[in-house]
Amino acid sequence: MPKMIFVSLPVTDVKRATAFYEAIGAAKNPQFSDDTTSCMVISETIFAMLTTHDKFRQFTPRPIVDARTGSQVLLCLSADSRDEVDDIVGKAEVAGGVADPSPKDEYSFMYGRSFEDPDGHMWGVNWMDLPAFAVQSDMANA
């Protein structure tokens, strides 16, 4: 069985956050959702648990960092093409997110952009041409 990852993100408005993640292609799993949490299925192995601040505090005594002014984690999703990178970031912007809060990654073997969700959580979206990366890596290590 493949390993799964559940990323818990504190949000100020679960309904707004749920709508945002649905707009960029995630699906809500009602089995693990309620008024305080939305389980958003990003892929068969990646889930974002959007939780109210009160619910999030049940899991840790540490203060919740304001994602707009501090960072604790950077999240990154893979994409199958440059067009998919642009599509996801475009959907995020239309849904109320901020497009490209971080510099774009643009190399011959990789293309990446980022978005910030309405609560300030930053996500990267990257496409990599693995054969081209292998060639470049081999040349660098020769």
Image (cartoon, rainbow, N blue to C red):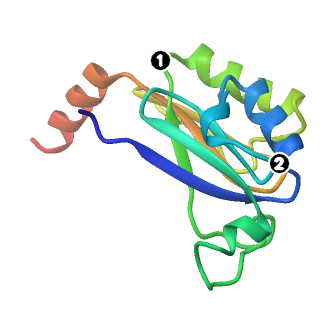
Distance of mark 2 from mark 1, alpha carbons?
A: 29 Å
- Where 79 falls versus 103 (above or below)? above
Query: Residue 47 appears at what percent x and percent y?
Result: 54, 40
The numbered mark, 2 or 1, whose residue comes first in the sequence reads 2
Answer left or right for 77 relative to 13.
Answer: left
Q: Residue at x 52, y 36 (%)?
A: 77
The residue identified by callout 1 is 80
Q: Amino acid at mark 1?
A: Asp
> Is 56 in front, or is 34?
34
Residue 40: which numbered mark, if any?
none
Q: How many marks?
A: 2
Q: Identify the residue at image location x=82%, y=55%.
A: 119
User: Which residue position holds label 2?
Assistant: 14
Residue drawn at (72%, 56%), measured in percent from left and top? 51
The relative height of residue 19 versus residue 60 in the rendered view (above or below) is above
Residue 17: % across, % down: 81, 43
Q: Quadrant of the N terminus?
A: top left
Residue furthest out toward the left? 142
Binning the other alpha carbons within 10 Å of mark 1 as few (below 14), some (14 to 19) or many (20 upward) gives few
Q: Quadrant of residue 120?
A: bottom right
Q: Residues within 10 Å of mark 2 (few under 14, many from 20)?
A: some
Left or right side of 139 for 11: right
> For numbered disc 1, what is the local secondary structure?
loop
Residue 100 in the image, given as x and y percentages of width and height: 74, 42
The type of residue carrying mark 2 is Val
Give left or right: position of 140 versus 89. left
Q: Quadrant of the C terminus?
A: top left
The residue tagged with tag 2: helix, strand or loop?
helix
> Could you tell me if residue 113 is visible in this image?
no
78 and 31: which one is in front? 31
Tell me where residue 95 appears, x and y as whole percent: 87, 31
